[in-house]
């Protein structure tokens, strides 16, 4: 085994991974822009863009990157759920992903939906193959690195996915039990302070999806943006650990993250699970589900009841 050092991150990998491009600067969770640029033509590396703005890919993307449309490709088209195994499997097969492919995800908005994609890849057993491009699209463009508009064809594979791993997904009944004090699990609300307090229902310019504002009782507020640098990269391991430890989250108890619809909380899930190694689940129902439920406890320091009043 060989140890690779990246600023703020120490990870262990195999010699096979080190041989990508002749040298490695990738951790178990992240790759930097220089590493990715050297590996764009590596047949064992597949790059996917997963952006909030689903049209940005066509306007230009990392050369060779394939597009995952979160509206269409990461969800079940018949029910509110993540993509069905057979649908996700077909997508990855057509994209040339195999059991030994290193999968790099990146996107806009500091990798919000790329991290959600990483969480879904993890639920289907591909977590060890997936890494985020640290800094995402924002940093790639800031560095003036190549952008392309061509769509690269791939040789299909026969990849077979396992059944979903439910161990990394929290459900409504799980968080209600925590809110009612039945489990010793740390809840992290990663939304803004105003969303957490109930002052607002959703970020500015975003449609309100819940009829009540506030947060799940017992949840601590650690906005997702507090763990990233100005350039969109994650802060160092020590900095991230301290940010959560200051809120009473040190990895000694299981954790559940949530936000509004599950994508921002996936970013925090990624940091806690893949970078820090904590036991954490993502509640993708998040406040959209919980804030619309009947008969559950809600904490609302701002005193709002209906539509901000």
Image (spheres, rainbow, N blue to C red):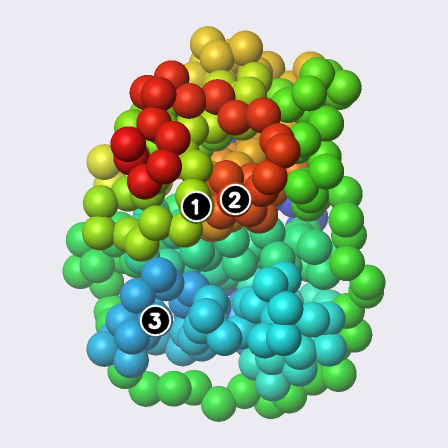
Q: Residue at 42% across / 22% down in the picture?
A: 300
> Residue 95: x percent and y percent?
57, 80
Residue at disc 1, secondary structure = loop
Q: Quadrant of the N terminus?
A: top right
Disc assigned to residue 210: 1
> CA gap, disc 2 to disc 3?
27 Å
Residue at disc 2, secondary structure = loop
- Looking at marks 2 and 1 on the same chain, the residue that comes earlier in the sequence is marked by 1
Residue at disc 3, secondary structure = loop
> Residue 238: x percent and y percent?
46, 18
Q: Residue at 43% across / 17% down in the picture?
A: 243
Disc assigned to residue 26: none
Q: Is residue 108 visible?
A: yes
Q: Residue at 43% across / 43% down in the picture?
A: 211
Report crowding for label 3: few under 14, some 14 to 19, many 20 or more residues within 10 A (C-alpha).
Answer: some
> CA gap, disc 3 to disc 1?
24 Å
Report the residue marked by disc 2.
292
- Looking at marks 2 and 3 on the same chain, the residue that comes earlier in the sequence is marked by 3
Q: Quadrant of the C terminus?
A: top left
- Looking at marks 3 and 1 on the same chain, the residue that comes earlier in the sequence is marked by 3
Report the residue marked by disc 3.
54
């Amino acid at each position: 085994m060989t140890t690779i050092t990246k600023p703020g991150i120490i990870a262990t990998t195999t010699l096979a991974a080190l041989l990508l491009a002749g040298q490695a600067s990738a951790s178990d969770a992240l790759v930097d822009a220089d590493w990715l640029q050297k590996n764009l033509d590596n047949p064992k590396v597949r790059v996917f863009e997963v952006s909030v703005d689903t049209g940005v890919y066509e306007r230009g993307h990392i050369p060779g990157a394939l597009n995952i449309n979160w509206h269409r490709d990461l969800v079940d088209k018949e029910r509110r759920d993540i993509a069905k195994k057979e649908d996700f499997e077909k997508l990855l097969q057509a994209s040339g992903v195999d059991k030994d492919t290193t999968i790099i995800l990146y996107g806009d908005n500091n990798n919000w939906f790329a991290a959600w994609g990483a969480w879904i890849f993890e639920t289907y057993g591909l977590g060890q193959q997936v890494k985020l491009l640290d800094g995402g699209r924002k940093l790639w463009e800031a560095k003036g690195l190549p952008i392309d508009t061509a769509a690269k064809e791939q040789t299909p594979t026969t990849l077979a996915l396992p059944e979903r791993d439910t161990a990394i997904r929290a459900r409504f009944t799980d968080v209600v039990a925590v809110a009612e004090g039945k489990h010793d699990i740390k809840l992290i609300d990663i939304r803004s302070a105003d969303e957490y307090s109930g002052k607002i229902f959703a970020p500015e310019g975003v449609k309100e999806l819940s009829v009540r504002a506030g947060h799940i009782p017992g949840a601590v507020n650690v906005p997702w943006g507090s763990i990233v640098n100005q350039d969109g990269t994650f802060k160092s391991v020590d900095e991230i650990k301290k940010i959560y430890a200051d809120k009473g989250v040190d990895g000694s108890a299981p954790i559940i993250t949530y936000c509004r619809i599950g994508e921002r909380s996936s970013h925090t899930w990624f940091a806690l699970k893949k970078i820090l190694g904590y036991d954490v689940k993502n509640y993708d129902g998040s406040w959209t589900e919980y804030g619309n439920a009947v008969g559950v406890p809600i904490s609302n320091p701002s005193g709002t009841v209906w539509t901000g009043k």
